[in-house]
Amino acid sequence: MDTLTDLLTARIRQLETILDLVGAYVYTKDLAGRYTYANKMVCELFNRPLEQVIGATDEEFFNLSISNELRSNDRRVLDQGEHIEAEETDVTLTGKTRIYWTVKLPLYSPDGSIVGMCGVSTDITERKKIEQAVHESEEKHRIMFMDSPDAYLIIRDGLFVDCNRASEAMLRGDRDQIIGRTPDSLSPEFQPDGKSSSQSAEEKIEEAFRNGSKTFEGVHRRLDGSDFFVEVTIAPMLLEGKQTLFTSWRDITERKQAEQALEESKRALEALSSTDGLTGIANRRRFDEALSLEYARHARSGAELSLILLDIDHFKAFNDTYGHIAGDDCLRQIGRVIAESAARPADLTARYGGEEFACILPETDHIGAVIIAERIRRAIQSLGIPHKTSDVAGYVTASLGVVTAQCHSEGSAISLIAQADELLYLAKSRGRNRVEFTVPDDHILAAAEKMHGNFVRMVWNDSFCCSNLLIDSQHQALFHLANELLEAVLSDRPAADSLVLINRLLDAVGQHFHDEEKILKAAGFPGLDQHVAEHAKLLTKGMELSQQFSTSTLPIGDLFQFLAYDVVMLHMLGADREYYPCIHNTVQEKGKST
């Protein structure tokens, strides 16, 4: 018997030791709520030995007016036999508040009646404090998220899953309209860099997950369809165990508009710094920059570069006669017609200084440059601006110098200007209201011998052919007749001999114009009417000049210049080239039909 008692006593002590070490408050109570057992942690909580705890009630340890859950839970177990698992907040008589997770079970006698209860309480006070702190932190961050002036949107699995009030205001819609959308659905089809918005969004998201936080600018589209510039910062994070992107959006439309306005102002200032204030064309500074660049470019490409310098004849006298206001208006009109005459995108018209103007003609050969120069001279003359103090004509005229060059790396733009200036001086010294030019040594029009300024021997080249045998043969014949007349001019032959040659040349020109017009009509040349009018004008002037020569009122040189320069060079090698494509097409169609 003693052995059994000892064994039971040992087992009880062993159980008590275990209960003292479980890390929870373990206790039992009778039906009156008196403690019948308490482990070591309960005794330490009450700061009493076990002997003083046994038989005591909770009134001796807790403020039951505050710790309502403790008594009510006990009675539910003791009176109704409930099994309770719940939080209890207990306040000791010393005012110390603790929170427990409590499990309370009824104890039964062999006959099944309740005789007491067993309780196991775990102190979760610190855990509850942490949970409360986390909750407060989450709430604080939630408030910060929702009330931030910056727009915040959260992306998961490629969709917006959350947004704040600022984003609703920015996107001009409510939360339900935003959640579930993809980023590119709130964007125009393409971004300013030319990429599609969907491609751009995918790249930015992949880069953020790969490299971390990233800030970039782009264009998004509000729910009302309007576009705006936005600065977006995206940062990867784990939310609810999933890869998520936190994005911050800032509307930078005003900033971008300011930047654009600043850029436009900058361009406007640059334009002002490179534009002549009076005429609206390029100024000297822009001219110098452009000519230097074009010279270097043509030195690399090997193409021909042409330059025209022109000066308004007797402009000082014009100003003295009509006043500076009229002079300014004259300069404006001349600047306009020069720009209209040299109107290719690559051409540059500039006011060189005072009454001097310049034209840069990239990739333009000698013939093309002279044709443009003559077009400018005639356009100025056609303005008909009165100039009664000019000894050239009763209206404003201009003198022009034209130079065409093969640019070289060892050369410079300054030499080109110097050559054009010399030719301009030559035009002035030879009576003004004229174009002076030189033929490059390696040009197809270069003569074996060049005399008396622009008197050059015409040399035929196959590149002048238009593929129509009659027109080409007549052009060659006119070259031959022009050279015959040149010989007569240079050898000082009698005027009667020269007049015979002049009449032959005019007759040949008239026949050529007649035949050419028939061919162009049959070919369906769209510019035929204008071409016929030009023919009539040239023939009429030719006959008038011939008549003046026959009455000794016009030098032979001036008549030759008109026939060789205006008729053969400018018209046949210039204007006639406009119908070459039409003639080529006609010849090709005939070839196919045969």
Image: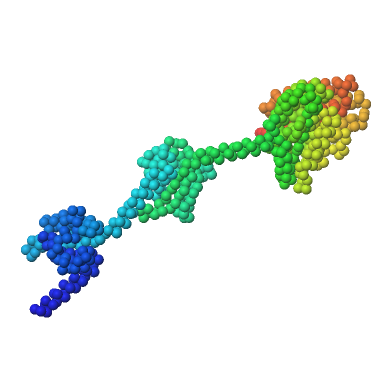
Which quarter of the picture shows residue 383? top right
Q: Residue at x 13, y 64 (%)?
A: 55
Q: Position of residue 287 (x, y in %)?
A: 72, 38
Q: Look at the image and tell me whether residue 560 can be seen.
A: no
Residue lying farthest front? 94
Q: Residue at x 81, y 39 (%)?
A: 419
Q: Nearer the viewer, residue 546 or 109?
A: 109
Q: Nearer the viewer, residue 448 or 260?
A: 260
Q: Nearer the viewer, residue 447 or 185?
A: 185
Task: Locate residue 148 relative to residue 258 in the image: left or right.
Answer: left
Is 27 above or below relative to 577? below
Is 26 above or below relative to 260? below
Q: Position of residue 272 (x, y in %)?
A: 66, 35
Q: Position of residue 196 (x, y in %)?
A: 49, 44
Q: Residue at x 40, y 40 (%)?
A: 168
| Image quarter hosting the N terminus | bottom left
